[in-house]
Image (cartoon, rainbow, N blue to C red):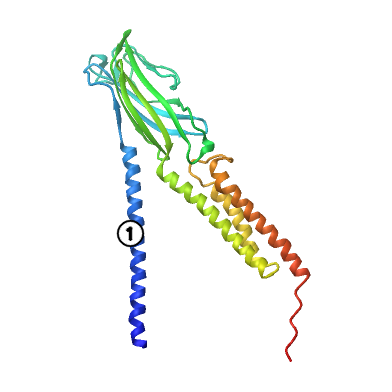
Amino acid sequence: MAMMRRPTRSRGRLLIAGLVLCAVAAAVTVGVWLQFGERHDLDTRYRAGGDAPDRVDITASVQRVDAAGRELTLRLLVTPRGDLAEAGGVAPAESLTLQTSADVRGDLTFPAHSRISTVDVPVTLTAGSITDYPFDAYDTDLEFGAVQGGEAVPVRMTLTNNDALFAATVEASEANGAAVFYVGIGRSTSVLIFAVFMMAAMWALAIAVLIGAWFLLSRRKGLTWPALGWMAATLFALAAFRNTAPGAPPIGSLLDYIAFLWAETVIAFCVITVVVMGMRAESHPSPDPPASP
């Protein structure tokens, strides 16, 4: 019988080990797939405008999204082409003005015969609120037209997103020689996954503390200091854990109302209840059972 049980146990252990390895491999595969998707989104280029030989090329990239300030920073590199440029596109042949949409703060002017360098432009975000974190989303409209020598000139514009904490959905089009982009901004997949994990972890810790408190109270354990230390440490550790949320959301966001504030309330209630009931148990200990004859 002992010889028959050993192979069965060995097979069971091998099966468990195989399942664990399969789970790890599946998790790694999903992680690689998600990371590849985010990398693909960051490498995606959105283009609007024609290929006229005499045009203005604009390379734009979203450098940083400030959800609290409701604006994003757009880095622009303007390069005139053909007869509009001199010195290989480094400088415009005549004064060049970029006319922008209302969400972009102000038009840009580049003097003739002067070298053009990159410039950072603030862009206002509309709709959405950071208190909806991590499900907040924003919109903005980008439109860039060019005027040189008093005449409108065609524009070709390329837009990319370099902020890994946000994902961009873009609709590109052309209108009367101007490049138009309708941009939607939302949290990236990695931020959403981590934020959801944080909320689940907060509730799991709160439930664990609640179960521990019920065990101490139901068995009248009194003031069990190691357990109280663990509960109090969890109370303060959750606050530090919450502050690691990507993007530093302000207090009062959806993350807090779904998980953080409730978890803190449950843990604080458990700590206070265990202390109060533990003091009562210590003050009125249960009588020892009578000794058996």
Q: Residue at x 63, y 54 (%)?
A: 266
Up the image or down, 20 lies above or below 172; here it is: below
- The quadrant in which residue 21 appears is bottom left
Q: Quadrant of the C terminus?
A: bottom right
Q: Is 33 above or below relative to 282? A: above
Q: Amino acid at mark 1?
A: Ala
* Position of residue 83 in the picture relative to residue 117 (left or right): left
Name the residue at 47% across, 51% down.
197
Secondary structure category for the residue under label 1: helix
Q: Nearer the viewer, residue 287 or 278?
A: 287
Viewer-closest of 24 and 145: 24
Crowd tier of the residue under label 1, counting other residues whose Cα lies within 10 Å: few below 14, some 14–19, many 20 or above:
few
* Left or right of 199, for residue 170: left
Q: Position of residue 280 (x, y in %)?
A: 76, 66
Residue 279 or residue 97, whichever sits in front: 279
**Residue underneath mark 1:** 25
On the image, the x and y values in percent for residue 181 come to: 35, 25
Q: Is residue 64 left or right of residue 154?
A: right
* Quarter occupied by residue 257: top right
Does residue 117 appear in this view? Answer: no
Residue 15 in percent (x, y) is at 34, 71
